[in-house]
Amino acid sequence: MKFYARERELDLLEKQYKQVKDKSIMTVITGRRRIGKTSLSKIYAKNKKNLYLFVSKKDEVLLCEEFIQRINEEFKIPVIGEIRNFRDVFKLIMEIGKKEKIVVIIDEFQEFFQINESVYSEVQNIWDEYKNESKIHLIFIGSIYSLIHKIFKNSKEPLFGRADRMVYLKAFPPGVIKEILKDNNKYNINNLFINYMLTGGVPRYQEILLDNKKYSEEEILNFYFEIDSPFIEEGRTILIEEFGREYGTYFSILELLSDGRTTRSEIESILDKDTGGYLEKLVTDYDIVGKIKPIGSKPTGRIQKYYIKDNFLKFWFRYVYKYRSAIESNNYSYIKKILDENLKTYSGPILEKLYHEIYRNSGKYTEIGNYWEKGNQNEIDLVCIDELNKKMIIGEIKLNKDKVNINKLNEKSKKLIKKYKEYDIENIRLGLQDIDEILAKESL
């Protein structure tokens, strides 16, 4: 698959490279696994003198032996004596940077928490000593969000404040998925929607589907739910290490969220335990869950809902983790019957999210979200506020927009409109068939 849609990030990295004249620059690239962090860094470094080091789960001595071999291959520098710790490897790299301008990429940097946690303070000391003498663009990559956040954002950690920029890589937006499908002559609205619903735009999943020539709903679902599917263990692979020993509780919460239990009270009534701390960590420490308040509500208001931000993980928890007994016995025909019965119901909120994303990516609106009143009354699927021009879009979204009752929408929005008396209001109906039109309109 060709390289898509990272122009902004590449431009940022190039600007930082230009700053590497008389001093070194540090960049951190993070984001969930499979999002393309390594590909981005390698594309950027391709025509520059560079060194790529991957921190695998092995003893520090063996890791250093591997790194020294790579350094010798790239720079032909004789190393006297045995180097057994990363501190000395990093010092050697910074010494090389005194003589020539280089890009140094250290991938999965958070793994040193398991290998030797003192590496972070050692790197800090060496960086502070050498950064104004060396000419290195140092890029740290990490896929465990909570640990990378701790390393570089926690004021108690040695590398706090050392990164010149942090790049948080996100999934492809719907417009890029459309571009990928068009490049393969497989674009239609249904193919775009099933792709978005299952992959959320994660680049690696796009690549897997393209390599296996899976484009339509039937092709993708049959491929997803088959023996040895690359997707079946993916949720567990991504999150077990992130959550550690308490993964069971986190997985239970995520399963409930994927099934439409969106409030803390609903979750606690089922799990029979206090989940406030877990939910807060899922939001702030792990960046897997988001929380929303009704448009127009006070920031201190207590009415809020939680949702899984990642489409792939939401689908995985809803149809793989929830039915793991059937999955483990390879009873995929049972899962497919469940999908036949309720995939359309599941699809509704995903279509809402897709439209939210399209409008948000347009950059035309101050705020985009949902509206509801106490007790989930008068729920509205889409509200877009343009504070600058005093305009507001109020939308109802269904797979088939002909089922939207515009009079009912007008009735539901009365209290909301009262809060925005000076605004021009546009009430709209949106369905699956409108995706192309809205994508084109909002990308202008």
Image (spheres, rainbow, N blue to C red):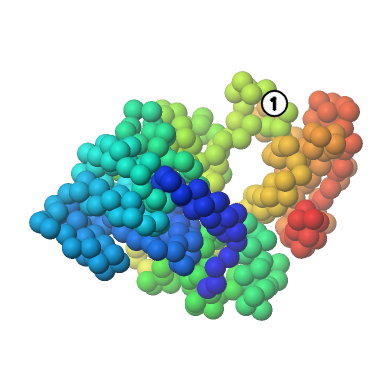
Q: Quadrant of residue 399?
A: bottom right
Which residue is pictured at 52% across the width and 59% down the height?
202
Of all residues, the one furthest to the left in this rendering is: 81
Image side of residue 262 versus residue 151, left or right: right
User: How far from the left and from the top, in percent, is residue 375?
Assistant: 66, 29
Image quarter of residue 392: top right
Q: Position of residue 168 (x, y in %)?
A: 50, 47
Q: Please give the name of the residue rendered at 66% of the width and 53% of the height, measured from the top-left corner.
A: 354
In depth, the one of 247 and 7 nearer the eye is: 7
Residue 215 appears in the picture as rendered: yes
The residue nearer to you, when weighing 328 against 241, is: 241
Farthest-out residue, top: 300
Amino acid type of disc 1?
Answer: Ser
Q: Assign the C terminus to one quadrant of the image.
A: bottom right
Rendered view: 349 above or below 193: above
> Is residue 30 visible to us here?
no
Instruction: Please name the residue that numbered disc 1 is placed on.
Output: 297
> Where in the figure is residue 424, as x and y percent of width and height?
89, 36
Badge 1 crowding class, 10 Å Cα cut-off, few under 14, some 14 to 19, many 20 or more, is some
Q: In terms of depth relative to the viewer, which is nearer, 82 or 79?
A: 79
Image height of 146 relative to 31, above or below = above
